[in-house]
Image (cartoon, helix red, strand yellow):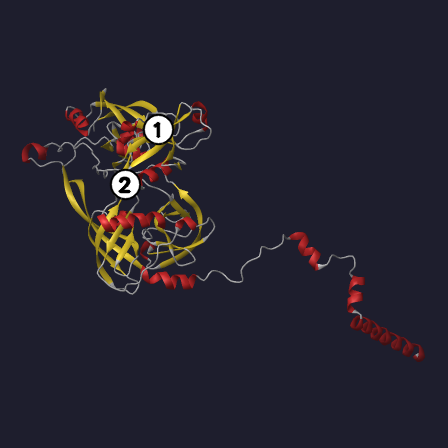
Amino acid sequence: MKKTLLIALISFFLGIFLAGLIFVYLPEKNSSEVFSDEPSSSSFTSALYASSVSQSSSWPDFVKIVEKVGPAVLKIEAEKVEKRKVRGFGDEWPFEDFWNRFFDIPREREQEYHSIAYGTGFFIASDGYILTNNHIVENTIKVTVFSVNKDEYKAEVVGTDSKTDLALLKVEGKNLPFTKLGDSTQLKVGEWVLAIGNPLGMEHTVTAGIVSAKGRQLGGSLNVPDYQDFIQTDAAINRGNSGGPLVNLEGEVVGITSNILTPTGGNIGIGFAIPSNLAKKIVKQLKEKGRVIRGYLGIVIQAITEDQKKILNLKEARGALVTGVEPDLPAERAGLKRYDVIVEINGTPVKDPNDLRFKIADIQPGKEIEIKIIRDGKEKILTAELAELEPEEEQEPYAAPGKDLGFSVVELTPRLARRLGLQTKEGLLITEVRRYSEAERKGLRKYDIILEVNQRKMKSLGGLDKILKRLESGDPIMLLIRRETDREPLEFIRTLRIP
């Protein structure tokens, strides 16, 4: 029995010894034999994942870019004075006429309000020139700028341009840190960019993103510039970023942040910047003349649809379709007519209406230009001597004292119509419809056009005022409204009551 147990133990330990010997000295052979039915790790990986995209060994060095550009970025505080119409105690019925009749005190009085607009700007020269947005510094009485080192400067407004939303400021100083305006035409969609500014009071904030698109246009609105060629970015931009630099990986400013698209008022990753190449042209004129001088042809234009291409016998839907010609201006004198399609200016192709606007604006008044058009399917060349585009006159929104119909209007001029892309050139443009008013309940909207009031054609605010003065509280008033949409314009009648 003992002998049998001894033989069993010796056999057990000998088996363990031999197994260990095999695994130590023949691991590769045994591994392949034992796991020959299982896929190798390399084949498993290749079956599930596509080959990786080759990447650089490191991320862009944002730190060096900020160290280079950051000292030139400024916080801007612009003090403004606005006049607003206000009502005091006793201005409602039945006291509405009391103050006028017995004390000659008007119901609505103008009152001054002081406010501060905050934004961003940056030095573009060592002698103190600063680039920022026009909407920050327009109508200001005092502009103060602060550097990242808390240095404070009083700034002078050298010139502004509302049509591109750019402004040039100047402070006294020498050897100031500044940044270079780069070449925005070299930007590519997908390229890294940084935005530096003062969003929501958070001074010297840096955000990163990419170029989302180029050549963006935001359409007609009273709140965007006439000349639009925006760079779109998803770098976080909020209130206070306006006027700040959009910087490429070379540390060059390729854009000036200007607008955001948002339903909430905050950043959702859709921001817009004015291209640096456009800014260079504006800065040069603002430095030399204090304003921007542009060429003017005197036409109303729109893009060409595929259907219009067929009807007008065009080879492609390229160029700008003339929908109106203003009298006694270069276009009329040159022989341009409605339905002409402008395809070239001075031998350079015209892509679309926005491209034509930029081309005409870049040519100085008094210069003679060649215009290639297509009329009735045939090419024709006309010659025109450009006039100067006059500055847009600002109009105060009008609401009749004592007879608040729930909306405000301005006179619709050809220039304002052109700015908003409207076909109608006369009437009263609704610029505001107040909430909970009868006008809102009756479906009136901002940018509706009042063509007639009580069957009388409206050409001026004076015409509306005359009608309203003859009406009493409770009297009805009938409006002929025109609403221009992407499709056919709509015309309809709405009746309101005098409050």
Image mark for residue 365: none
> Where is residue 261, by image quadrant?
top left
Numbered disc in front, either 2 or 1: 2
Pointer 1 local density, CA inside 10 Å: few below 14, some 14–19, many at least 20: many
> Residue at horizontal 35%, vertical 57%?
180
Where is the C terminus found, in terms of image quarters?
A: top left
Residue 370 seen from this side = yes
**Percent position (x, y) of residue 181?**
35, 54
Residue occupying image coordinates x 78% and y 57% = 37
Report the residue marked by disc 1: 322
Picture quadrant of residue 352: top left
Q: Earlier in the sequence, mark 2 or mark 1?
A: 1
The residue tagged 2 is 364
Q: Choose between 61 and 332: the one closer to the eye.
A: 332
Compared to residue 383, the image places residue 160 above or below, namely below
Q: Position of residue 81 (x, y in %)?
A: 18, 48
Spot the residue most to the left.
102
The residue located at (26%, 56%) in the rendering is 129
